């Protein structure tokens, strides 16, 4: 849920730039992103990096916290997905230190050669993105995360992405990648997949219903966001989609669907995007977020005629993250000047 407890809701449409509020706040806001290696974790937080910039956003990959190098893992017969092959306690301690604004000595793992380098100083930005296999693994980690994502591509998509990445960046051949995928599958199901139940948003990626070939030619996929309802909203939010523009101007296929999940333990809904949407529709969503948060510029679809379901999902996720940060009360009085809000208690 976004926010907790009661919060004063000022009136009016004016307000300072929320980016400056974050810059001047003592709070370090941590976004946790979990998922398998090569699952696209970085993709779905890229919008936050672009919106707030490198001076406010820093990123840590938990691969740096492997306990064993590649050769040692082979000798021991363990995969990096097994928690025993990672420094979970050190991740927890470093996360707590970063939340307090302290610089840590971050380990360094070099994927190109599969060995460790010397630790380096890491100063957290006002927004820290924590990405890795075990980001949501322990209760102590989850307690210190402010917004959480779990990225879950379909098997076929994940294999395609991992093959392309590991062959291009890690020097593997195709058979090596496929062999590793099979070896890792039991540990993925045992240690990584269960973390999805702790995420604020689960992101599923599959091939487009309009053809899997579109993934290679135009980066078109079907993307589903499974998420909890928002309890609070910035006043007068308009995230409407111009249906007339879609019907009259679009020359490409696009799907938008909402699915209610019947789960008595947790109220969740799933919004599904597929295909390509005219960029002018996304520009209107961006302008609405700018007007309500005073964060500028938000321009993820620069000089493009069409955007994909991945782009739209990035924008929605960015909106939810900004939303959570606005209502994060633990940051204290310095954040009381945030843009005008309306509390929606459901």
Image (cartoon, grey):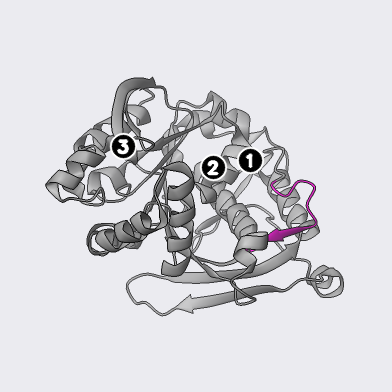
Helix, strand, or loop for circle 2? Answer: helix
Residue position marked by numbered label 1 in the rendering = 339
Residue position marked by numbered label 2 in the rendering = 326
First in sequence: mark 1 vs mark 2: 2
Residue 19: percent from left, percent from top: 61, 33
Can you name the residue that lies furthest to the right here?
248
Can you name the residue that lies furthest to the bottom here?
262
Residue position marked by numbered label 3 in the rendering = 114
Q: Residues within 10 Å of mark 1 (few under 14, many from 20)?
A: many
Helix, strand, or loop for circle 1? Answer: loop
In the image, 334 versus 271, the foreground residue is: 271
Residue 228 visible to an observer of this rendering? no
- Badges 1 and 2: C-beta atoms under 8 Å apart? yes
Residue 124: percent from left, percent from top: 43, 27
The quadrant in which residue 316 appears is bottom right
Please tell me which residue is depicted at 34% across the width and 55% down the height of the picture.
176
In the image, 238 versus 224, the foreground residue is: 224
In the image, 173 versus 69, the foreground residue is: 173
Q: Is residue 234 above or below residue 261?
A: above
Residue 313 visible to an observer of this rendering? yes
Q: Which residues are magenta?
A: 300-309
In the image, 205 versus 247, the foreground residue is: 205
Please tell me which residue is depicted at 54% across the width and 42% down the height of the picture.
326
């Amino acid at each position: 849920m976004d926010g907790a407890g009661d919060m004063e809701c000022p009136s009016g449409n004016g307000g300072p730039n929320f980016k400056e509020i974050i810059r001047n706040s003592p709070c370090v806001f941590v976004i946790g992103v979990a998922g398998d290696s090569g699952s696209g974790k970085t993709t779905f937080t890229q919008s936050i990096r672009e919106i707030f910039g490198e001076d406010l956003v820093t990123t840590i990959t938990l691969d740096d916290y492997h306990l064993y190098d590649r050769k040692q893992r082979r000798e021991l017969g363990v995969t990096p997905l097994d928690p025993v092959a990672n420094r979970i306690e050190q991740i927890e301690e470093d996360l707590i230190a970063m939340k307090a604004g302290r610089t840590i000595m971050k380990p360094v793992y070099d994927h190109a050669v599969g060995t460790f380098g010397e630790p380096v100083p890491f100063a957290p930005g006002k927004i820290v993105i924590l990405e890795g296999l075990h980001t949501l693994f322990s209760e102590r980690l989850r307690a210190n995360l402010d917004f959480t994502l779990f990225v879950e591509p379909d098997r076929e998509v994940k294999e395609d992405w991992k093959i392309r990445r590991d062959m291009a960046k890690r020097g593997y051949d195709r058979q090596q990648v496929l062999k590793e995928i099979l070896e890792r599958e039991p540990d993925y199901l045992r240690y990584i997949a269960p973390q999805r139940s702790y995420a604020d948003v689960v992101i599923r990626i599959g091939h487009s219903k309009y053809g899997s070939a579109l993934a290679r030619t135009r980066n078109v996929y079907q993307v589903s966001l499974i998420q909890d309802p928002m309890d609070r909203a910035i006043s007068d939010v308009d995230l409407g989609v111009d249906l007339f523009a879609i019907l009259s101007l679009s020359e490409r296929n696009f799907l938008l669907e909402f699915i209610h999940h019947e789960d008595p333990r947790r109220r969740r809904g799933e919004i599904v995007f597929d295909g390509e949407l005219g960029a002018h529709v996304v520009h209107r969503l961006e302008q609405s977020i700018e007007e309500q948060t005073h964060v500028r510029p938000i321009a993820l679809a620069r000089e493009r005629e069409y955007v994909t379901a991945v782009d739209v999902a990035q924008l929605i996720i960015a909106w939810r993250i900004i939303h959570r940060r606005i209502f994060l009360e633990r940051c204290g009085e310095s954040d009381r000047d945030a843009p005008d809000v309306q509390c929606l208690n459901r």
